[in-house]
Image (spheres, rainbow, N blue to C red):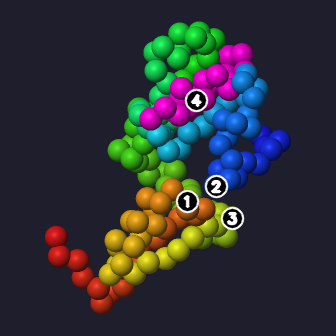
Amino acid sequence: MGADVVIDYHKTNWTDVVADRSVDFVYDTVGIHGTGDLSIPKLADHGVFVTLEGSGLASKATMKTRPDARQQKPECIMGCVQHGKLEAISKMVEDGKLRPHLEQIYPLSNTVGALNHSMSGHTAGKVVIEMNAEESVVV
């Protein structure tokens, strides 16, 4: 698996670069309404569109135009924690085999800044809120 072309979404709309019926698979991690409708025409014969959010699914009308294409949305993302997998990932991090890219670390006192950064849609890594022992949270 790899990329033939890298698209900078800050400068170029991916739908202008990717030709119709040219890709086997589109993986949407954002789920913006309409993404499925834009993705289905780009799929090659029997291609698959996967989105993490139901709002990203293609409409029934779009799917009728491409009966060979499929779309999927996982039934569960955050509510289906599999501890064994989390422990395996944790071990990979501890062993230095997996290094997450931390774009920015915010103190707990600047949670609003962290949220705004995350919601900007232009992060290239994880946005982290760091809690120190001397900070407390009132709920």
Dot 3 alpha-carbon crowd within 10 angstroms: few under 14, some 14 to 19, many 20 or more: few
- Which residue is depicted at the point 50% across and 45% down? 30
Q: Earlier in the sequence, mark 3 or mark 2?
A: 2
Of marks 1 and 3, which one's residue comes earlier in the chain? 3
Query: Magenta region: which residues?
Result: 33-50
Alpha carbons under labels 1 and 2: distance apart: 8 Å
Q: Earlier in the sequence, mark 2 or mark 4?
A: 2
As drawn, 82 above or below 86: above
Residue on which disc 1 sits: 122
| Residue positioned 53% across, 29% down in the render | 36
Relative to residue 78, is residue 86 depicted above or below?
Answer: below
User: Distance from label 1 to label 3 (Cα)?
Assistant: 26 Å
Q: Amino acid at mark 1?
A: His
* Mark 1 touches mark 2? (CB < 8 Å): yes
For mark 3, give the secondary structure: loop
Q: Find the distance from the CA under tag 4 to the CA under tag 3.
A: 36 Å
Quarter placement of the C terminus: bottom left
Q: Nearer the viewer, mark 3 or mark 2?
A: 2
Would you name the residue on which mark 2 appears? 10
Can residue 117 be seen here?
A: yes
